[in-house]
Image (cartoon, rainbow, N blue to C red):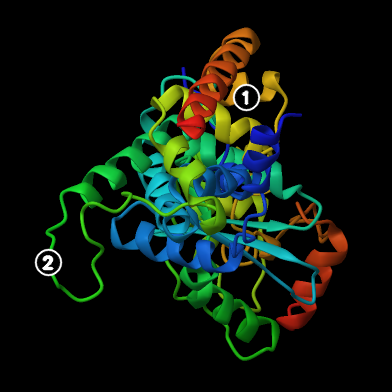
Amino acid sequence: MSELERRLARGGDVPPLDAERLGAALRSRAEAEGLLDVAYASMDSPLGELLVATTPRGLVRLAYAEEAPESVLGELARRVSPRVLRAPQRTDAVRRELEAYFAGKLSAFSTPVDWSLVRGFAVDVLRATATVPFGELTTYRDVAGAAGSPRAARAAGNALGSNPVPIVVPCHRVVHAGGGLGGYTGGLDRKRWLLSLEGAI
Amino acid sequence: MSVQLPPFQALVDAHAVELHRFLVGFVGPDEAEDCLQDTLIAALRAYPRLDHGDNLRAWLYTIARRKATDLARSRARRPTGPMDGLKPANEPAVDPVEPADEGLWAAVRALPAKQRAAVVHRFVTDLEYRGVGERMGISEEAARQNVSAALRRLRKEMDR
């Protein structure tokens, strides 16, 4: 290496990037310029870590820890917008509601839902499910009926299994007519936990 | 069909540190952070309109070079005179990386854009020629040529 090259390489002693400060500046500029299409953050909960994603229209995704964040965020990038940024502040409202719910102090969420990730019959099923009150149970057959297809209980079950916003759209309140708990995206232990929190079982 | 673009945050997480390093060499430490912000905001704005997701890193470096050039131009247009803390126009448009080696960095900044970028990637970011080429969207050989042309030119400048 020549003397000139050594002198150039000394230019590599650069002050480290303050990633926190950069992140904060990016978030606020993106927000001010209307470029923050999907904001996300993670939060702790009695059901493990949750990933929460919002758009300007509302809560678009809530994922349990079993789902890899890269795949959850990748799907949001593909199906909603690739302008996805870590922006905890934008998810504050829904995170506060979730905390209150887990503490037994909130029985109905006021955060609006952005249904962008849901298509077709599933929209009707999940909208019907969203009206089932705290502490009550309904059946796959009944939500299918409320969605306009009383005989489509199995399809309703599939739609509930693909619920992008569990807890807030309370698919855990849907059980088998015969008395079985049915299934749950986050596993039956979580379903049982949620229903006992609500005093439904 | 839709283009497969990763979440923008993944690009920031993967490339911000190195982009910053590059910009420190390219425009100087005082301007690097603002320039990096401008780069990432411009990228975020254009991102959904990209028609493919190939070589996003080279795309980011193209924007960074453009932002750095814009910055230098706006600097050069600044009014002169005894105004609060503004630098006189005859000073270099941007600050050198190493104050001690001001002459060298002024010469680096006077290089043609491609040579300047290649030199910064090679020496400040400490990349092999293949990595330099990848970031500039050119071949390894072209990267090597740009660096050696830059070094020849710098030697001539420094010998004056």
Whether residue A159 can be seen here = no
Q: Is residue B156 above or below residue A143?
A: above
Q: Quick one: label 1, few (<14), some, or many (20+) residues within 10 Å?
A: many
- For disc 1, the marked residue is B132
Report x, y in % for residue B47.
41, 35
Q: Chain of mark 2?
A: B
Secondary structure under badge 1?
helix
Which residue is at the front of the view, B100 or B148?
Answer: B100
Q: Name the residue at 46% across, 41% down.
A: A80
- Residue A161, compared with residue B132, is above or below; it is below
Percent across and percent down for residue A29 are 36, 61
What residue would you read off at disc 2? B81
Task: Check the residue under mark 1 and report the chain it is in.
Answer: B
Judge left or right: residue B27 versus residue B118: left
Specify which label sits upstream in the sequence, 2 or 1.
Answer: 2
Q: Are marks 2 and 1 in contact (CB under 8 Å)?
A: no
Name which quarter of the figure residue B124 lies in.
top right
- Residue at point 57%, 12% (across, down): B145
Three-letter amino acid code at disc 2?
Gly
Residue type highlighted by circle 1:
Val
| Residue A190 visible, this angle | yes
Q: Residues within 10 Å of mark 2 (few under 14, many from 20)?
A: few
A1 or A26: nearer the eye? A1
Above/below status of B160 relative to B23:
above
Residue at 15% in and 49% down: B77
Q: Estimate the x, y position of residue B86 in percent, counting from the top left.
A: 23, 67
Q: Give the Cα separation between the discs numbered 2 and 1.
A: 40 Å
